[in-house]
């Protein structure tokens, strides 16, 4: 699945300006397909374009449907966003992070992310039309999010998951590389006499635990290896 497969569905939005803001939020994250459950003539074109700014092209290509079921008919999954749990609601809700890490996102096909009316959210009946539910964690003192803010959060999670190749400067190290780095540190510590016969396995486990939790990049691991290599070289030189 790619960002081109993501469809944002707004079910009966009331405020035209929120549609414009949602368009901008989508464009920020490279998501371009907007579907609305409602009629186009019910919304104010000028207000939408003012808030969309340079993302009005998304509004121009928006598709309109009579129901969530129709809007998501060509999708392999439809996820309804809701802040409320209840007897008639989904038995379980996932966070945005859990959703983007799920198996459905790994498949080929389209996904519909459904957002309810700004005032009432998705009704029980509307949520029933969705195959699963997403809940954005928020303060219990004020849990209701602005529509475009909710769209932004979900789109951001999807962008981070589906467009990781666009992020430069960080390549996480593999376990093989981590073992190599730890072994190199231990070799250099042994050279300077930090331990002689015993103690190396415990030291390697110590460094492996710390470095695995630190989520080092390739560059950081290489630099760390150089630091210990240089330190060992200087120690050997001073001894001689």
Image: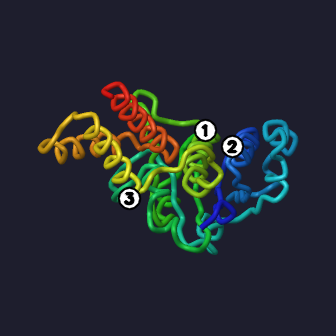
Give the residue furthest to the left: 198
Which of pointers 1 and 3 indicates the residue nearer the eye? 3
Element type at marker 1? Answer: helix
Q: Name the N-terminal-most of marks 1 and 2.
A: 2
Q: Quadrant of the C terminus?
A: top left
Residues at marks 1 and 2, CA–CA distance in whole angstroms:
8 Å
The residue identified by callout 2 is: 25
Q: Quadrant of the N terminus?
A: bottom right
Is 50 located above or below residue 208 in the figure? above
Q: Secondary structure at mark 2?
A: helix
Q: Nearer the viewer, residue 26 or 40?
A: 26
Eye-nearest disc, 2 or 3? 3
Alpha carbon distance from label 1 to label 3: 40 Å
**Nearest to N terminus: mark 1 or mark 3:** 1
Horizontal and vertical percent for residue 181?
38, 48
Above or below for 99 versus 5: above
Tell me which residue sits at (51%, 60%) in the image: 79
Number of the label disc, if any, that sits on residue 176: 3
State the residue at coordinates (61%, 51%).
159
Q: Residues within 10 Å of mark 2 (few under 14, many from 20)?
A: many
Name the residue furthest right. 46
How busy is the neighbourhood of tag 1: few (under 14 within 10 Å), some, or many (20 plus)? some
The part of the image, by quadrant, that contains residue 140 is top left
Is 70 placed left or right of 188 in the picture?
Answer: right
Residue at 18%, 37% in the rendered image: 195
- Give above or below for 30 relative to 194: below
Left or right: 74 as drawn, with respect to 228: right
Q: Work out whether residue 31 or residue 221 is closer to the camera in this orientation and state it.
A: 221
| Number of the label disc, if any, that sits on residue 149 | 1
Q: Are marks 1 and 2 in contact (CB under 8 Å)?
A: yes
Label 1–label 3 contact, CB within 8 A: no
> Neighbour class for label 3 at 10 Å: few (<14), some, many (≥20)?
few
């Amino acid at each position: 699945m790619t960002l081109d497969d993501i469809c944002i569905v707004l079910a009966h939005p009331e405020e035209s300006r929120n549609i414009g803001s949602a368009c901008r939020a989508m464009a920020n994250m490279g998501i371009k397909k907007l579907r609305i459950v409602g009629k186009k003539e019910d919304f104010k074109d000028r207000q939408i374009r003012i808030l969309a700014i340079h993302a009005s092209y998304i509004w121009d290509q928006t598709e309109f449907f009579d129901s969530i079921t129709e809007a998501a008919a060509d999708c392999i999954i439809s996820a309804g966003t809701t802040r409320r749990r209840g007897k008639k609601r989904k038995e379980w809700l996932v966070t945005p992070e859990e959703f983007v890490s799920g198996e459905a996102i790994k498949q080929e096909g389209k996904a519909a992310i459904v957002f309810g009316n700004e005032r009432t959210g998705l009704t029980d009946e509307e949520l029933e039309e969705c195959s699963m539910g997403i809940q954005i964690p928020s303060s219990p003192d004020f849990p209701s999010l602005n529509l475009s803010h909710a769209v932004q959060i979900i789109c951001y999670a999807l962008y981070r998951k589906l467009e990781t190749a666009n992020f430069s400067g960080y390549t996480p190290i593999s376990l093989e590389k981590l073992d190599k780095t730890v072994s190199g540190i231990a070799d250099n510590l042994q050279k300077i006499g930090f331990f002689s016969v015993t103690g190396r396995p415990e030291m390697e486990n110590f460094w492996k635990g710390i470095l695995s939790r630190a989520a080092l990049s390739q560059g950081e691991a290489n630099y760390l290896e150089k630091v210990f290599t240089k330190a060992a070289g200087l120690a050997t030189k001073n001894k001689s």
